[in-house]
Image (cartoon, grey):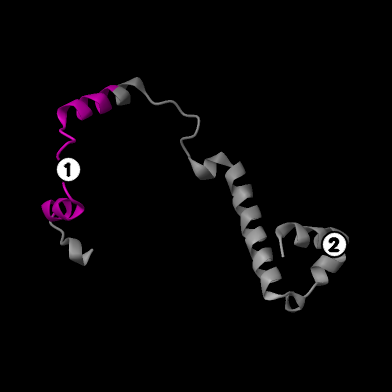
Amino acid sequence: MQASDLTVKEQDITVEEQDSAKVSSLTVGELKLLIKETVSETLKSLLVDTDLIDPDFGKQIRPEFVAKLREAMQQNNFDECNSASAVAEELGFNWNEL
């Protein structure tokens, strides 16, 4: 069964019939497809609201921040990276207990 098969069935059913339809009458495949489509629709509706995706969407980065970031990048040697466990140890944590 494909998503288009279920969509066609839904179009043939009135709103009242959809509300009274029983999940028990669906096959396992139809139920999985229904859940998949419901999750997909929900995610798509959430993605429309960009504030939920990125609260900084559309905002400009201040030139002062860019300058500080460039300065920090020039001062640090990124060729030498510490492992997460080494950083945790420097901060007084035991990586295996986190």
Q: Position of residue 4 (x, y in %)?
A: 75, 57
- Which residue is drawn at the image coordinates 15% and 33% (left, top)? 77
Which mark is nearer the camera, 1 or 2?
1
Residue 62 higher or lower than 42, as above or below: above
In the shown orientation, is residue 67 left or right of residue 31?
A: left
Say whether residue 10 is magenta: no
In the picture of the structure, the residue carrying the numbered disc 1 is: 81
The quarter of the picture where the C terminus appears is bottom left
Where's residue 83, x and y in %?
A: 18, 50
Task: Give me the residue at 16% from left, 50% from top.
Answer: 87
Residue receiving disc 2: 15
Instruction: Give the distance between the C-alpha atoms of the residues marked 1 and 2, in whole angstroms.
Output: 59 Å
Q: Secondary structure at mark 2?
A: helix
When the figure is inspected, residue 57 is found, relative to residue 91, above or below; the finding is: above
**What predominant SS class does the magenta segment belong to?**
helix
**Residue drawn 77% across the image and 77% down it:** 25
Q: Answer with left or right where residue 16 lies relative to residue 52.
A: right
